Structure formats: structure tokens, C-alpha cells
Image (tube, helix red, strand yellow):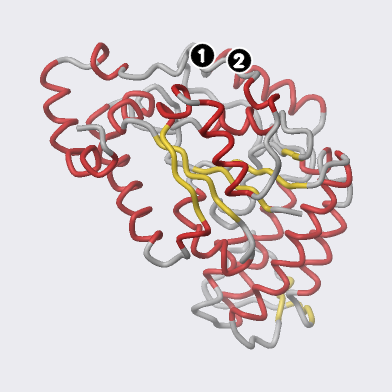
Amino acid sequence: MNICLIGGSGRSGTTILSKIFALHPDMADVPEWRFLIDPDGIIDFYNSSENWSPYHYNLHLHRLEKQLNKASHTNFFERLLHYFDQLLFKKLNIPIKLSTSYSGVSATSFSPNYNQYSAELINSLSDFEYMADWEGQNFTEHRKQFYKNFSGKEEIAIFLRKFLTNIMVDVTNQQDKEHYLEKNTWNILWFDKILEILPDAKLVHIYRDPRDISVSFSKQLWMPNDVVQCAKICKDIFNQWEEIKKRVPDESYYELSLESLVESSEQKTKDICQFWNIDWDRKLLDIDLSRSNSGRWKSELNQQQKEKVNSILNNTIVRLGYE
């Protein structure tokens, strides 16, 4: 099983690229379940083990357990609310959120044994439990305390690797496919840590003109509506990725622009298949790429905004070849 990851800054083409490769006959794909990289998720728990105390470890393990449970499953009512969130309120740019966290995920639909593997992970990360209170603890927090003899991040990585591998095998078996495909916005910001847990993972980073990204950011509920502020966030994301690249092997990631994917779909999908070591299939050309909105910043920004955005993003624009 190959672990094929797609990532980017957000609004950069990750969704369309994942839709393309979801058509591959040997590829099992999943929704954007973010328990790997979101706060209190797998990577967050892994990072927290760098600074250990019994109280800190207990708190972060409770948070991980809660996060995994959130992604577990959804009922009909939650899915209905998620539908209205996605197709009505977001399209109308109404800042209302009705659905619960991760209501669009339902991990058990893709990994039937997800709950079992989650429980096994929490058990493996705890030697024993006891009831206690500690100074500063919120009265609403769990009195049940987890404890594990801590022997370093390497041991933690082993348990997390087993959990993620079990999930991926479960997904591929469920879909009767050979390889595992996952898209997550901002996984590029944690890719060095992902490799410490999943050393065989290979990431495709897709990017586009950062000015277009900034404009698209400003239309999202999860970003500022000020395009200049969005440009600052965009710049920092790309700068952080440049630092991450210094800490990972060159052969662990492949980069391409959305514009090049649109212009040379067949060649770029063949290049990605070669990178992931999978066979190319003509079905990868079945997605319409004509609505990529390349260059939208030119028509949607006024002159003052253009000057500010270009100034903020100048180094990134040059580095990516959009000057």
C-alpha cells in the first residue's frame, strides 16, 4: 500500500487534484478528515510529548480521545445541518455554523473498524487510570487520569503509526483498492512530523499564484475578508513550507502548480503517478479543469489592493515563478 498525500496552502487546487486521483482504479480516497493535523489531533498529541509531565500527558491524551470521537460518525440530523452549512450558508457568505465539529467526516463510513482502532490507541497510550483532582483543573474536566511510563517520542510514534496504518488498511480493504489517498489543507505545515510517524508517506504539494490564493482566502468563512490580511497569512504559510522542506528528504515530496496541471494535465498526472509509484490511467483526464480561475486577482482587486498584495507577496511570487 502506497500512502499518497495531497496538500497545500488551501484554495490552491488540492480539492480538484484529489478528485482527479479519486478516479484512479487503484486508489482508495477519504474525506478531508483532519484528525491527523488539527489541534488536539494525532500530530498535536505527538508534538506535546516533547514537553512531558503527568498532568500535561493526561490532558493531551483526553483531548486526543475527544478529537478522535468527534470524527467517528454522524447521525442523519448532523448530516442535514452540514448540508445546509455547505450548500446554503457558505455560498451566501452567511457566517452561521449549525453543524457540529467534523459533521461531514463520518470516519466509520470509510473505516468500519475506526472506533475499535481508536479505543486500542488510547489504551496503548495509557498504562493505568486513576481518579484524581489537581490544582488548576477545571471542575468540568475529567477526574479520570491517564498515566503512562514515558520513554520518549519514538515510542509514541510507534503507537500512532500502528493506529494510522490500521485505518489506512481498513479504508483500502473497504473500497477494495490498493493505495491510500488523503487530502488535507495545511498538512504541508506538519509534513516533517508526519514523516516521523509515517516515513513512507509521499506528499504532492499543489500551489497556484499566491495573489489568487489570497483573493480566494478572502471569500472563505475560515479566513479574514480583508485580502491584505489574507496575503499576510498566505505569505507565512509558504514561508513555513520552505522551512519544512529543509527538514525532509527531497524524494518525499513533489510540487506542481495548478496552472501547469490545467495546461498539461496528461503529463502532470503521469509525473505524479511516477512519483507515487502507481500506474497512470486515462481516467485521470476525466475532470474538467476549465474553471480554475487563474489570474482572478487582476480583475477582483483595485489598484491599491494590488500594490499592497504584491508588496507583501513579492518574495513568494518570485520564488514560485509568477513575477
Residue pictured at 82% horizontal, 31% vertical: 75
Q: Quadrant of residue 103?
A: top right
Residue pictured at 61% horizontal, 46% vertical: 34
What residue is disc 2 on? 87
In the image, is residue 288 above or below residue 169? above
In the image, is residue 296 above or below residue 272? above
Q: Quadrant of residue 106?
A: top right
Q: Residues within 10 Å of mark 1 (few under 14, many from 20)?
A: few
Say which mark, if any, is on residue 91: 1
Tell whether 149 sits left or right of 171.
left
Measured as percent of width and height from the top left, residue 41 is found at 61, 57
Amino acid type of the residue tagged 1 in the rendering: Lys
Q: Nearer the viewer, residue 132 or 264?
A: 264
Question: Of helix, strand and loop, which one carries label 2?
Answer: helix
Tell whether 39 sits left or right of 319.
right
In the image, is residue 44 above or below residue 173? below
Residue pictured at 39% horizontal, 22% vertical: 219
Question: Of helix, strand and loop, which one carries label 1?
Answer: loop
Amino acid type of the residue tagged 2 in the rendering: Leu
Measured as percent of width and height from the top left, residue 225 is found at 32, 25
Q: Residues within 10 Å of mark 2 (few under 14, many from 20)?
A: few
Q: Nearer the viewer, residue 11 or 92?
A: 11
- Quadrant location of the C terminus? top left
- Quadrant location of the N terminus? bottom right
